[in-house]
Image (cartoon, grey):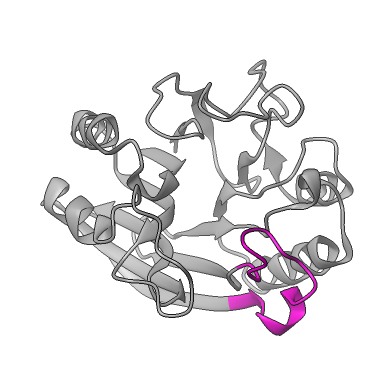
């Protein structure tokens, strides 16, 4: 099976992103996306370069997939698309609320979106696909909010014994305590690889913060191949996992 995870940057590089998704759809079983627009913002300012209906556009690009969207706030969230696999249940849990992020300002003095973990439980094979977008800001270093975020995500994952794949944009440097803690529970494929970054050249601070995106797998997952793909379709690079 093959999985690809990507922060789409809300579709700012739309045509290359569209081509990338369509080109990879034939041999990919699961897409996990972060920063997916799905309608107009209710409480946040619009940004003209973002694609407001990106989720619906991707649905049209992937007619053989079933999409599952989890809202963070009205207008944006995370999404997983699954092809020809039986989904047993979908569970979305708030990891950090707006109130818990009240002291963080990232854009025009706006509080970050709440953080939500989306878990897609497949029936055959019996496996959980966990899609996450971590709290931004603070130069991707350890903070009290990120410490709480890590504890809550790991608690949810520990509640189930079935095989798991945890993916997403964690907004964390590779040497943070938070990433180490995730790596103590699951295999960190980015850290174990020779890839030097998960950011594209479109990210202005790539040199000082080269990592943000990760794939973690439980010991039950047999990794056949792992890649950071070179395609520049966002300010993030896509991660690709082949597994049994």
Report the side of 216 relative to 77 (left or right): right
> From what the image shows, is residue 19 above or below residue 185?
above
> From what the image shows, is residue 151 above or below residue 12?
below
Image quadrant in which you'd find residue 56 = bottom left
Residue at the spot x=41%, y=24% of the render? 232
Judging depth in this view, the residue of 162 and 185 nearest the camera is: 185
Report the side of 44 relative to 22 (left or right): right
> From what the image shows, is residue 9 above or below residue 190?
below
- Residue 72 location in percent, x, y? 49, 72
> From what the image shows, is residue 9 above or below residue 192?
below
Q: Is residue 184 magenta?
A: no
Image quadrant in which you'd find residue 159 = bottom right
Judging depth in this view, the residue of 48 and 195 nearest the camera is: 48
Q: Residue furthest bottom?
A: 99
Q: Give the number of callouts.
A: 0
Magenta stretch, main secondary structure, is loop
Report the side of 27 relative to 185 (left or right): left
Q: Quadrant of the N terminus?
A: top left
Image quadrant in which you'd find residue 36 = bottom left
* Magenta segment: 94-112
Residue at the spot x=72%, y=29% of the render? 191
- Residue 24 location in percent, x, y? 25, 31
Q: Quadrant of the C terminus?
A: top left
- Residue 199 location in percent, x, y? 57, 29
- Residue 163 location in percent, x, y? 56, 55
Residue at the spot x=64%, y=48% of the render? 218
Residue at the spot x=85%, y=63% of the render? 147
Judging depth in this view, the residue of 110 and 208 nearest the camera is: 110
Q: Is residue 106 magenta?
A: yes
């Amino acid at each position: 099976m093959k999985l690809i995870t990507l922060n789409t940057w809300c579709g700012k590089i739309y045509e290359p992103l569209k081509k990338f998704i369509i080109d990879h759809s034939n041999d990919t079983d699961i897409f996990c996306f972060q920063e997916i627009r799905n309608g107009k913002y209710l409480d946040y300012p619009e940004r003209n370069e973002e694609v407001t209906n990106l989720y619906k556009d991707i649905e049209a690009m992937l007619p053989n997939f079933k999409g599952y969207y989890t809202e963070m706030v009205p207008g944006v969230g995370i999404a997983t698309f699954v092809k020809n696999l039986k989904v047993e249940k979908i569970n979305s849990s708030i990891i950090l609320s707006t109130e818990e992020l009240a002291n963080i300002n990232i854009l025009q003095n706006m509080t970050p979106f709440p953080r939500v973990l989306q878990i897609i439980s497949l029936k055959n094979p019996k496996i959980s696909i966990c899609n996450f977008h971590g709290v931004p800001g603070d130069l991707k270093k350890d903070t009290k909010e990120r410490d709480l975020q890590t504890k809550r995500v790991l608690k949810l994952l520990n509640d189930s014994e079935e095989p798991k794949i945890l993916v997403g944009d964690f907004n964390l440097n590779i040497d943070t305590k938070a990433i180490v803690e995730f790596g103590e529970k699951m295999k960190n494929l980015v850290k174990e690889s020779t890839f030097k970054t998960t950011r594209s050249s479109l990210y202005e601070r790539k040199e000082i913060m080269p990592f943000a995106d990760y794939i973690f797998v439980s010991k039950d997952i047999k990794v056949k191949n792992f890649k950071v793909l070179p395609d520049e379709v966002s300010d993030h690079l896509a991660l690709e996992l082949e597994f049994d």
